[in-house]
Amino acid sequence: MKHIFVTGGVVSSLGKGLTAASIGTLLENRGLKVTLQKFDPYLNVDPGTMSPFQHGEVYVLDDGAETDLDLGHYERFTDAKLTRFNNLTSGQVYQRVLDKERRGDYLGKTVQVIPHVTDEIQKRIREIGEKTGVDVVITEIGGTIGDIEGLPFVEAIREFALGQGRENVLFLHVTFVPFIKAAGELKTKPTQQGVAKLREIGITPDILVCRCEKSLTKEHRQKLSLFCNVPYEAVIEEMDVEHSIYEVPLMLQREGTDDLICKQLGLDTPAADMAHWRDIIRKLITPRHRVRIGVVGKYVELQDAYKSVYESVIHGGVANDCGVEIERIDAEDIEENGAAETLKGCSGILVPGGFGERGTEGKILAVQYARENNIPYFGLCLGMQIATIEFARNVLKLDGAHSTEFDPATAHPVIALLDEQQNVTDKGGTMRLGSQPCKLKPGSLAAKLYGSEEIHERHRHRYEFNNTYREAFEAAGLTFSGMSPDGNLVEIVEVPGHPFFVASQFHPEFKSKPNKPHPLFEGFIAAAHTCDSGKIT
């Protein structure tokens, strides 16, 4: 089994996850089986309780693990089947070590970072390979080289390489080569110093991936090769992409990255056939159609808060050969300026998941505007709950209808706490999480889009539709098109006769890929284009 370790230097947010995912894409298209894992140095057990302002999106896997958003990149770019074993945090490591100490596993020994913590990290590296049986394991080390909290992980991979043999391990370092505008040139010194820090720990990178906004010259590559002790051909340029993150695999292929990896690791494979990937890029750059989609939330100023949602909308566009302009709309702006003014020009409206009361009334106004004006609407998790609240208030005329999450004293709690959540006190990992089955109503729009009457989708929520109101909703025209197999939990609602009004309690954005767009996103963009075309004519 071969191992690739991806580290980062100089600054954070370099795109290590995208680089790792892109390498996974290239290796899969060379016929290799690949899995990817992320090691996060923070002490949280997982990111589930972290604010989007701190961490961005929490990405949920089939097994219910709440993980780093980079695992979303891994799943979107590759066919790897990820589980909770694909994301490891310092919190998990130290918790495991301390549990062993309390049990007496280390009886008589002083428990230390080396070897006990590093051994635990190495154990996870070996486990993921054994569990998956893949050809290549790609492991991304979160944070920046030199961070105190990341040192045990870096030491662990150094030790691991020593034990596995360097012919089976490759170190790939992602670095930043800044362009100094006043000087009019790229500067290599930060990379030299970052790699020096890595070499102090005992790791010399085999490949140097240079993030930059201007192209590297021959002289830049020579200098980086000399001072970083990396072969000239292993200095890889990774410029800012012009159109889409999905250009990165093709960029790395042009640089010969996958050839270098296979040569270093002794992998005899044919060149990667990326024709299908180039077709995706063609549809992204020169689509035949265009639509504007308004995403209404409270974290819209944060690039990564709704990362999977934005990507899934783009995938839906690819499926329809349709370029998508995403307009990020703060729900509070709708509260202040009205839905008609704020949402004008949108061909479709989407309300994503979330928690907390801020912006709720703005989201309700957005749903009302979409429903009453025949604008395609797609609600995800909270977006489904908001849709039922709006329907209750404005169609059923249930004054003050709300969710007990936002108004515990509401006279009409159309959204209420799940029964299984009633006595839950701990916050971490306690929601309804992971893949759950759902039965679709025959003849419904959802069933037509899926082409099936039974599906599995990923969940992350504590509240649900209150079945006390179900008959009243159905009598007023709302269709419950997706239900849990026992018929107790509402999973999808629709408004029949509307161009597209679908809202799901689950998160379909976690199962969409550029080459396999999710059917609900594909249907949503198709409806948005059709309605937009209708307006134009």
Image (tube, grey):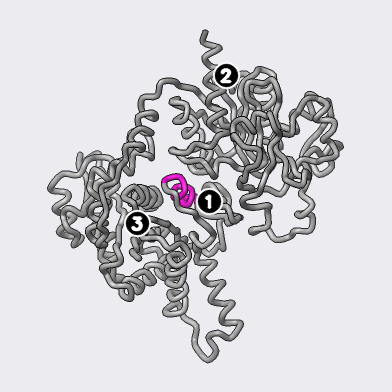
Amino acid under label 2? Lys
Of 71 and 436, the residue lying toward us: 436
The amino acid pointed to by label 1 is Gln
> Circle 2 is placed at which residue position?
344
Question: Circle 3 sits on which residue?
Answer: 8
Name the foreground residue: 439 vs 240.
439
Residue 152 appears in which quarter of the rendering?
Answer: bottom left
Q: First in sequence: mark 2 or mark 1?
A: 1
Q: Which residues are magenta?
A: 69-77
Q: Secondary structure at mark 1?
A: helix
- Residue that numbered label 1 is attached to: 54
Q: Residue furthest bottom?
A: 108
Image height check: is 365 above or below 484? above
Q: Nearer the viewer, mark 1 or mark 3?
A: 3
Residue at 42 percent of width and 57 percent of height: 35
Residue 365 in the figure: left or right of residue 232: right
